[in-house]
Image (cartoon, rainbow, N blue to C red):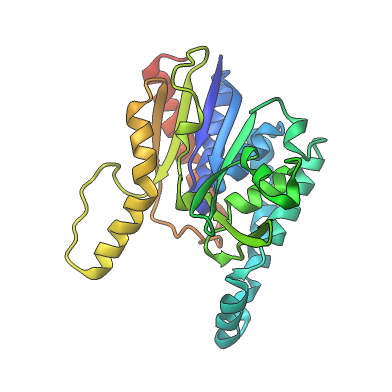
Amino acid sequence: MQADVVFSGGGVKALAFIGVLQALEEYGITIRKVAGTSAGAVIGALVSAGYSSEDLIKMLPELSMFARAEQKMNRTPTILRWLLLYWKKGLYSGDGIKEWMDRKLFEKGIRYFEDLPHEKLRMIASDLTDGEMLVLPDDIKRYTNDKQGHLTIAEAVRMSASLPFFYEPVKLKSGKEVHYIVDGGVLSNFPVFLFDEEEQQVPLFGFQLTAEEIGATRKIDSVVELYEALFHTMKEAHDQRFIKKNPRLRWVVVKTPSIPTAGFQLRPEKMHALIRSGRAKTIDFIEKEGLK
């Protein structure tokens, strides 16, 4: 059977999505269209290009090397890091992730969204200058430096996965104004809304990562807890509205350990533990839904 799939953001915890893919493949479920935010956009792009879960597992050592290369900045003196953050608006350039993605897609003969079937892949980014959500590749046409909307998938992934303060924002121009584009998770971390709720030809599976119980009330006894609750509400309120109203959605919550979003220095055993958690949860979902 076919299914449309949504992958949430979640940083390094998105390795659990490899386990999700393993389960889908084992039960003969193929992905027709995919949408994602941030790390979910990374996985979505690779899946759209034809990479299997086995291919992604083989990439784990490569991903670890890539993460260590990004983390070399940690040896930079603290004062210099703060200066770079001030001037560049991010600790790391983000060029590495774009170049890596471009290379992986090129190996499959893919570079542009036009190389894929229409709406096969979409992802979310955030325009901080205008305070607006971007659906890529559709919304790239509003910027004068890409009038034809000719956007590479790697460039879109770089925008969607630009974790604020960690990666430098992507700069786009509209007229004379510079727009700062950052992680899509700022405005929509689980973009269920990208799929038409009325279309019933194929099911819609949404895989969301969380380290806490969905819908749990938050205890607010300090200003720190108030800030955390405010940040989570800003991230989740938009998506929760669409989750609840979309009858087509089959929502799968993958519980993960409490790992920092940018905690890329994971040992192999922890990587594989995340993969196993995604596979186990998805198999449980498939069997309960009678999809086997």
Where's residue 105, x and y in %? 76, 41
**x, y percentage for residue 44?**
61, 37
The residue positioned 58% from the left and 31% from the top of the image is 34
Query: Is 192 situated left or right of 244 in this image?
Result: right
129 sits left or right of 235 in the view: right
- Identify whether 140 is placed above or below 227: above
Q: Name the residue rendered at 48%, 50% in the picture.
A: 185
Q: Residue at x 65, y 34 (%)?
A: 47
The quarter of the picture where residue 66 lies is bottom right
Quadrant into which the N terminus falls: top right
Q: Is residue 254 left or right of residue 266?
A: left
Q: Judge whether 132 appears above or below 226 on screen.
A: above
Q: Can you say whether 104 is above or below 48 in the image?
A: below
The quarter of the displayed image where residue 89 is located: bottom right
Q: Would residue 65 be visible to someone looking at this image?
A: no
Q: How many marks?
A: 0
Residue 179: % across, % down: 61, 59
Q: Residue at x 48, y 18 (%)?
A: 203
Of residues 114 and 69, the one nearer the viewer is 114
Res 218 visible? yes
Counting from the top left corner in percent of width and height, residue 142 is at 65, 45
Vertical arrangement, residue 19 with respect to residue 65, above or below: above
Q: Give the quadrant of residue 2.
A: top right
